[in-house]
Image (spheres, rainbow, N blue to C red):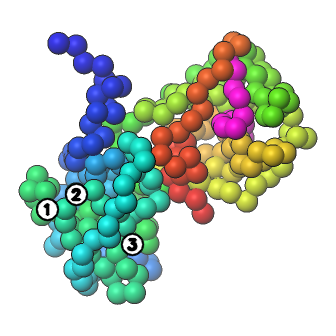
Amino acid sequence: MAIDLGQQWFRDLAELRHTTTPKRIRALLDGRTVLDTRDAMLVYEPHRVVPWYAVPPGDLQLDLSEHDPSPVPELRGPVLPPQHNEWHTVPGRSLHLGDRGEVAFRPDAPELGGRVVVHWEPFEWLEEDEPVMGHPHDPFKRIDVLRSSRHVRVEVGGVTVAESTRPSMLVETSLPVRWYLPREDVRMDLLSPSAHHTVCAYKGVASYLSADGAADVAWFYPDPLHDALPVKDMVCFWRPAEVLVDGVSVDTSMPGDPRATDGPTRTR
């Protein structure tokens, strides 16, 4: 029997998924190391597309209290919006840190060996000695940036705002292909800076641009992480813009909450 790996990825979203990691994981809170472990797992709760660290409770130096978890509303799609960290789609106990509220969750799943899933915020994270932003790095995800000579045209409200035959094609696991265009091929006079920013664990902090009647319709990375250096300062468009590649309109939608991911995973 043959397996379509793309379809399998979507089928498995409804399952609790986990994998080991050889990395030393540390978390800091207010400048103090509150977690230092070499026995972490990466855990993907059902309907989540990015993982969290799950760690032995003895490696977590916090005074936590147990509570009932928050109820999860009926999901409208296959993907759980990433900003709702207080929602958990498996049975377990919510772990609170004083007036900060829930900062961790202990799933009942025996496969995790009693490990505690720790929220990303309010902590600062290190994998080995390298800071990590956005969310844990996923070992099953990668980015390819390919120079291309395809013809890319972008319309917003029927107006052409960009046209290029020298785009860069950014292919990121499980996400739509993104087409990044040189600024010289973009009508920057039709775009204005936005106060919106998102964070991607692999690409860095994205800045956004708005067009008339289309808020935050494009983004760029002014100071990208290593994987995204080839698209530094290049402009990428998504809905409500229409992106046409060799005359064919392409999908720029994003599963779940579009403000939370293109790769970026949270606003700030």
Q: Quadrant of residue 168?
A: top right
Q: Which secondary structure lies at badge 3?
A: strand
The residue wearing badge 1 is 108
Does the image show residue 35? no
Q: Which mark is residue 89?
A: none
Give amino acid for label 3. Answer: Leu
Label pair 1/2, CB-CB below 8 angstroms: yes
At x 61% / y 46%, what residue is drawn?
224
The mark nearer the N terminus, 2 or 3, is: 3
Give amino acid for label 1. Answer: Asp
- Residue range (magenta): 233-245
Inspect the magenta stretch and tell me whether residue 243 lies in it.
Answer: yes
Q: Position of residue 30 (x, y in %)?
A: 44, 80
Q: CA distance from mark 2 to mark 3?
A: 27 Å
Give amino acid for label 2. Answer: Val
The mark nearer the N terminus, 1 or 2, is: 2
Does the image show residue 158? yes
- In the rendered view, tell whether residue 111 sits above or below residue 69: above
Inspect the magenta stretch and tell me whether residue 259 lies in it.
Answer: no
Q: Which mark is residue 90?
A: 2
